[in-house]
Image (cartoon, grey):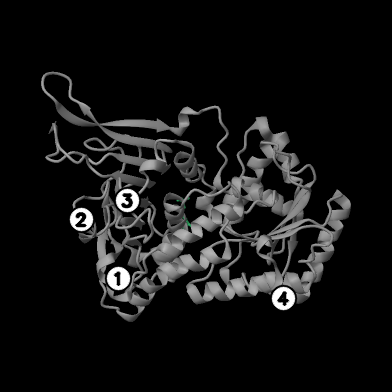
Amino acid sequence: MNNPEPHILIIFGASGDLTKRKLIPALYELFEQKLLPEKFAVLGVSRTELSDQEFRQKMREFLPGTSKNEAQLTIFLESLFYQSLETSFAGDYLKLKKRLETLGQTLSIPANYIFYLSTPPLLYPVIPQILAESGLNDVSQGFKRIIIEKPFGTDLSSARDLNRKLLSYYTEDQLYRIDHYLGKETVQNMLVTRFSNGIFEPIWNQNFIHHVEITSAETLGVEDRGGYYEHSGALRDMVQNHLMQLVGLIAMEPPVVIEANAIRNEMLKVFQSMRPIRETDVPNQVFRGQYTQSHINNEHVKGYREEKGVDPQSKTETYVAIKFFIDNFRWAGVPFYIRTGKKLPTRVTEVVIYFKTIPHHLFVYQSDSEPINNQLVLRIQPDEGILLKLGMKVPGAGFRVQTMNMDFHYNELSNSYLPSAYSRLLLDCMHGDATLYSRSDAVEKAWECVQPILDAWQNNPDIPVYGYPAGTWGPETVDNLVENSIWRKPCKNLAHDGEYCEL
Ligand code: BG6
């Protein structure tokens, strides 16, 4: 593939955390891989007064430093520029426009611009409007694209409002709603696993699959994001976006072609087929929890209510588990379980497909009284890979069966360059490819799926928030959600499950 067309990437919120921790390192990664355009510049924008040089120095601290790559780093840093701006003040955008023109002339870059909104969400409707009013959405001299960070709205109605507003100034193909989960190599591999292997697709349906379990567990708590998290909670922070995307990729029909709209149409259909969880179903189908203080490795760990920026009486959920169904031909009757939480025993994101057991039992099973469900584990992180659980004969006399693991680990492909999620997504946007970005209708549909849960919690404050000690697998009562089976307790290492587990 050719390198992207020359352009300037304008990052609003350039003094924020995301810029230095994710965006600049991702751009540097693209630079090292020689994937950036030949003529390219980054213009950091925020309120803080900084010179280009000061901005470069600040960003330098977040880039890998060895004497070997010092010359490369210098070249990269020279492509960074900075403009201080009162982001919500329209009068200031003339400064921005002038600066972009000057940069364009000096560096011979045409008026191709990508605006990255890495600001507080309140500014998501404001900045694009002022850009448009300043003529910076005019595509006659070059492309204009906008990348919008999550959260895209705080509920269904605010997401709709935001879409409406953006679409009154821009066309859908100028808008790139980012969900960094879609940028993960292993998330994209779910499509490849499903649609490039003849053995999976024929059994990927309600005839053969018993249930599907999706887990996204984190060991970290809310750290210094208590203020944001208090108004978000796990449902808005993780489920409405990241986990819904995983559900979409696991459950979708094969797209006609691998192209943005074909894939996004199929994702949308999954969200449209999700059986709405009515407010009255919420107490039985949705469990919420909050971590309480505990001891991990003899160290005291704070409970959520003791975190900075958190109300000591807070009912915000740091854990949520949901059971739902997808009412279509493929998935009728198959329960889907998703769970996510902070301060769980290990950091892991994975999808587990539990196949139905064989219809007639011939053998004696080593440790289980019942034949095992074959399981296919698609591990997204860490120890990225795929694990298949199979029944095998125990060597020796008779026909006893034990469960064995067949595993593939991505790190075995040591020669391949695995782009970070942000590098991949930034590069796609530079190429004008929105396949891995969310479309307006899908974002709204995903909100429609979670909105009844938010409403139920809002209208019925008696729905319990179960406490769970930090470092455990969430509230015990959540086990009641899953019939006939228990949640998998994954380990850091994909194949280390059962007796020994390195957390
Ligand atoms: C972010 C959430 O979108 O995703 C965080 O706001 C969460 O709360 C993070 O920690 C998880 O991302 P990852 O890539 O570490 O799984």
Q: Is residue 458 above or below residue 417?
A: below
Tell me whether circle 4 and circle 3 mark residues in contact (CB < 8 Å).
no
Q: Earlier in the sequence, mark 2 or mark 1?
A: 1
Q: Is residue 274 left or right of residue 490?
A: right
Q: Residue at x 33, y 76 (%)?
A: 456
Disc 4 versus disc 1: nearer the observer: 1
Q: How many marks?
A: 4
Q: Earlier in the sequence, mark 2 or mark 3?
A: 3
Tell me whether circle 4 and circle 1 mark residues in contact (CB < 8 Å).
no
Q: Residue at x 76, y 74 (%)?
A: 133
Q: Which residue is mark 3?
A: 206
Q: Is residue 207 visible?
A: yes
Check residue 483 in the rendering and tell me which mark sits there, or answer none: 2
Q: Earlier in the sequence, mark 2 or mark 4?
A: 4
Q: Residue at x 88, y 54 (%)?
A: 105
Check residue 407 in the rendering and tell me which mark sits there, or answer none: none
Q: Is residue 422 left or right of residue 393?
A: right
Tell me whether circle 2 and circle 4 mark residues in contact (CB < 8 Å).
no
Disc 1 versus disc 3: nearer the observer: 3
Q: As shown in the figure, which amino acid type bears the numbered disc 3?
A: Gln
Q: Which residue is mark 4?
A: 89
- Residue most toward the right? 105
